[in-house]
Structure formats: structure tokens, C-alpha cells
Amino acid sequence: MKQVGLGFIILLAVALLCGCQGAQSEASAGGSDSLYTAERIQQIALDRPGEALALLDTAEVRNLFAPSELGRLRSLVYHNGLSHYKTAYAHALKAYNDPESRRDPVKFLSLLSLMADQCHYNGDYAASMGYCAEGLELAKKLGDKTIEAELNVTWGLNLLQMRQQDEAFQHIDLAISILKDAVGRDSGYHSWDVLFYALGQKQSLLCDNDMYRQALAMRPDMEEALQGLVTSKDTPEGCSDMRRAEMDVLFSCIAYTLGDKAEGDSFYRSVEANPYASTPDGEYIRIPCLILAKRYDEALEYIGREKALLKETTDTANWDYINPHLQSELEAYQGKGDWKSAARVQATMLALTDTLRHRERQADALELAEIYKSEEKDAIIEQQRDEIAVRRVVTGAVVLLLIAGACFAVIVVRKNRSIRRNNVALVARIKTLLKQQKELDLKINENLALRDRIEQIKKELDEAKGGNATEPITPTETDAELATASAGESPAEADRILFDRIACEIKDKRLYCNPKFSRADVLQLFPVSPNKFAGLFMQFAGMKFTAYVQNLRLEYAGELFIQHPDWSVDAVIKECGMSRTAFYGLFVRKFSMKPEEFRKNALRDHGNGR
């Protein structure tokens, strides 16, 4: 039964608030008798939308409105009069995209508010919030507190659909705060009406979240808003009695839902005392209270009267007839225990639901057809202009592309030639450097051999002075000079000679070509401490031993590419004793080109006979 109560509360809130908005539209319309004015079209948009659209079609033919104003007014008619929110948004979007619409900021603000509502009804909550944000900025500049509050309410409703209840409450509370401040300065009906609407939305939100006591506690604020409607001079006659009756029914339903029968009965007695409750519409709003109070026979009596009235005055094949009218009858029979009658009502509801869904599909198709028709009409107007513009753009683009393509091709060809020449020159330069390095290594070997000869002569001289030899050796003048030169070596010179010996040993025997070659292999050949060994390479080679060996391998690879350009890259890598991954990265870093490019340029250089 609690869910039944909640359903009635929400339905009543929607009916109440929609009524307020309808009255608002009527009250805000101008009194001009002219047929082709915005005020006249706004006045008949709600009750006679077909006539309003016909007037707009004629006005368009006669050029009486700017395109942006035509879009805004058509959107208003489809929104308020026909509830075709997709079509309404399509026309509103045309007006929004027209720069002319921004010349009148007041009308543009109204358009933004309308589009925010339409996107909300169409389920595009993100777009709705975007229009709300834009509208709020403009409303603050114009000082329009009423529309600022309306946009905050719409923002809150979007957040509610996105399951962000806390933020939704914040925006609706902000709207209420703005409106309370506004009604303090403006006692007109419209300001009180929007405040009443915002309060009703908050109350509906509270009921949706099962916060019935908080909703019940809003009675003083609602009473204040209703009192404002009573005292306003432009309030439609009988409106305040109708709103009061609806509010009392709403609070009565909340009280019954909470299980407070005494308070629910008290509110219901207030409903009975209200003159509006004796009218046909007033009798109908009693039904939710009677069902929640378990007075099913009385509820069924009022339901029967309402159904008879509806069958006489309107087409009952609509969603409102199913819910709340037939839904109320179903719940009354279920509460009474008359399951046969309940089954009959439920069968009627199912049949009507199928009919309405079929109608909705047809209506959606017609609505989309209307949108396409409008778009096709606009497209025909712009077609010739667009074709000319497209031809010009295409022609210009083709010419520019041809020029750009030709320039790009010339640049690429010249760049490739330059790179090729530079690479060939670089290979030749590397070839020269490697040759010079070979010559330098040869000189170092000769120097070391000469030093060995000096050491041998020195040794022989020392033996001769010691008298150990039976026949004294008479050294030549050259041997004496060499011995004298060798005798004055410093420690730094000795280290340099040691490094040269190690380097020559590695290069001459190509020890670096062994992938497993390491410092331990060198230390077996030369009795040097590990610490001093590392220092020798840092001092005289400017790099660590590992880097030195890798550098020798790369130089040897370059030499192989130059001497054997027909060798594959993999063959050179294998000969140098390196892994493929390490070789590629180090080779590019040293020679500034890939091994394949180096090989190709070496082959080209070889073909040129260099």
C-alpha cells in the first residue's frame, strides 16, 4: 500500500505542476488582436497548436518573421501545444544556430530555457545541463531571477535522472532561495507560480526517495506560495482554490502513506470543505485519499463518475486514462477484494496499452517525417548555394593539393639526393678515418718494438758494466743513445706504454671478435691490478673497457662493410662478435646511419672506384 500511496503522490504532483505551467503560459501571453504576432501565436500555442502552426507557415511565406524567430515560435508550439519534444528541439536548434537569435538576449534566454526542457524530456540530460549552464550565465547578466530559478530546477531534474540526488536537492534548494528573494520584490502571479513549481518539484523528489516526513514538513512553504497566489492581482479566478485542494490531497496522501490516519483525515476534511472539491475535477482528486483511507466504495463511486464524464467529453484512449484513472479503479477493486472486477479492469488496461503503443509508433514516425520534411525544405533552399561553394572549394583544394604535391615531391627528391650524397661522403670520411687509425696503430706498434729494442740494449749495457761478460760488448753510438732515452721514463709514460701494449695486443689478434672476450682475458696476458686496469682505459681511451671493446667491434664492422660490401649485415655482425639488437643501436649512434644504409653507400662508393 505504501507504493500505491507513492504513485498517487507523484501523479498528483505532476498534475498540479503541469497545471501551474499551463496557467503561466496563458498569463504571460500578450493581448494583441493581430493574427501574425509572436504574442498571438504564444497565446494560442497551448490550446490551438494547429492554428498556431498554420499562422507561422503563412508568416514564413510573407516574410513576417526572421528565421530565428520562426524557429523559436515553432519550437514553442510543438513543445507546449503538441508535446512533440523531438520536433520542438529540431526547430529550437535551428534558431539557436542562427547568429541573429543572439541579438535579443531576453528571447535567447527564453530559447535556452526551452531547449533545456526539451533535452530533458528527450532523455539527453548532458545536453540539457549544457543549455542550463549557458542560460544561467545569461540570466545572471540580465538579472532574470525567475528563469535563473527555472534553469536550476531543470538542472536538478537532470541530476535526479542521473541518480545524483544530493546535487539535485542542492539545485532545487538554490532555485527556491532565488525565488523567495524574487517574490519579495515582485508580487506578480508568475513569480509565485514558479516558486510554487520549484517547491512542488522538491516535494516530489523527497517522495521519490521515501522522505515523506520531510515532504510533509514543506507545508508552511507551500502555504506561503499559495497565499502569494491568492493575493496576486493577476491570478486566474478559482486557481488558488484548485491549488489548495490539490495540495491538501497531496498532504493527505503522504499522511496516509506514513500511517498517520488522523492527520490524513484532517487534511481530507479540508479538501471536502473546499468549493473546488465539489466540481467534477475536484471530485476526481479525492480518489487517492479515499483509496489510501481504504474507503473503496466511495472511491469507486467517484471513479465511475469521472469515467462517464471522460467518455462524454474526450477520447479515453490515452495514457492518462490508463494511469491514474483505470489504475485507481484497479487498486480500489484489489483493495476491496473484488478480483473478478480487478481482472476485467486490468484486461482493459492491457488492451489500451497495446493500442497506445501502436499509436505512439505511428506518432513517432510522423514526428520524424515532419523533422525530415523541414530539413529537406531547408536543404532545397541552400542546395544551389552549397553546390557553388562546394565547386569553388573543391577546385581550389585540388589546385592547392597539386601545387603542394609538386612542391613536396621536389623537396623529397632534393632531400633524398642530399641525404644520399651526405651518406656517401660520410662513408668516405669514415673510410679515411679508419685508414688513418690503421696507420696510427702501425706507428704505435713500431714505437713499442723500438722500446723493446731499447730495453734489450739497456740490459746488455748493465751486464757489461757488471763485468759478467767474458768479452765486453762495445755498444754502438745509436744503442747508447737509445739506452739513454729509455732511462728517463716517468710513471705516466710507463702507464701510457702499458696501455698501448694492451691495445695493440687486442687489435693485432682481434681479440674483440670473440663474443666472450672480457677483462679477465686481458689480465691473464698482462699482470696489472684490476683497479689500475680500469684507470688505464678511462685515462687513455676516455671510456670504460667494455665500451672500448664495443667501439673496436663497430670500427671493424665499418671496415668490413667497406672492404666487403657484398657481405650481408648478419654476416658482419657475426664476424664482429656482437648481438643483433646491441649492434643496431650502437652502430646508428656511432655512424649516424643504419647498417643497411652504410652497406649500400659503401657499395656505391666501391662502385665509384674510391
Image (cartoon, helix red, strand yellow):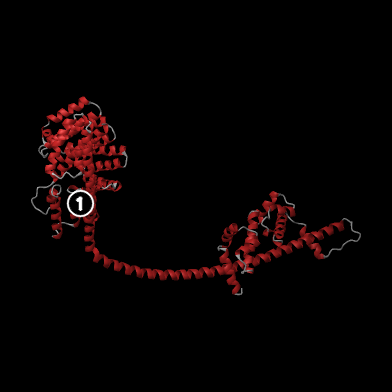
Relative depth, front residue between 225 and 177: 225
Q: Is residue 109 above or below residue 419?
A: above
For the point 20% across and 51% down, which residue is it?
A: 75
Number of numbered callouts drawn: 1
Amino acid type for the residue under numbered disc 1: Ser
Is residue 401 toward the left or the right of residue 4 in the image?
A: right
Is residue 583 toward the left or the right of residue 223 in the image?
A: right
Residue 115 in the image: state x and y as whole percent.
Answer: 24, 49
Q: Is residue 607 above or below residue 30?
A: below
Residue 227 in the image: state x and y as whole percent.
Answer: 15, 33
- Quarter of the image for residue 343 reads top left
Evaluate whether residue 242 shows in this view.
no
For disc 1, the marked residue is: 75
Q: Is residue 132 above or below residue 564?
A: above
Relative depth, front residue between 390 and 298: 298
Residue 566 in the image: state x and y as whole percent.
Answer: 62, 69
Relative depth, front residue between 446 and 517: 517
Which secondary structure, mark 1? helix
Locate the N terminus by quadrant.
top left
Relative depth, front residue between 58 and 476: 58
- Quarter of the image for residue 282 reads top left
Q: Is residue 454 above or below residue 301?
A: below
Evaluate whether residue 272 shows in this view.
yes
Farthest residue, direction right? 470
Locate the C terminus by quadrant.
bottom right
How packed is label 1: few (under 14 Cα within 10 Å), some, or many (20 or more)?
Answer: many
Farthest residue, direction top? 262
Residue 341 in the image: state x and y as whole percent.
Answer: 20, 35
Farthest residue, direction left? 33
For the point 64% across and 63% down, which residue is it?
A: 556
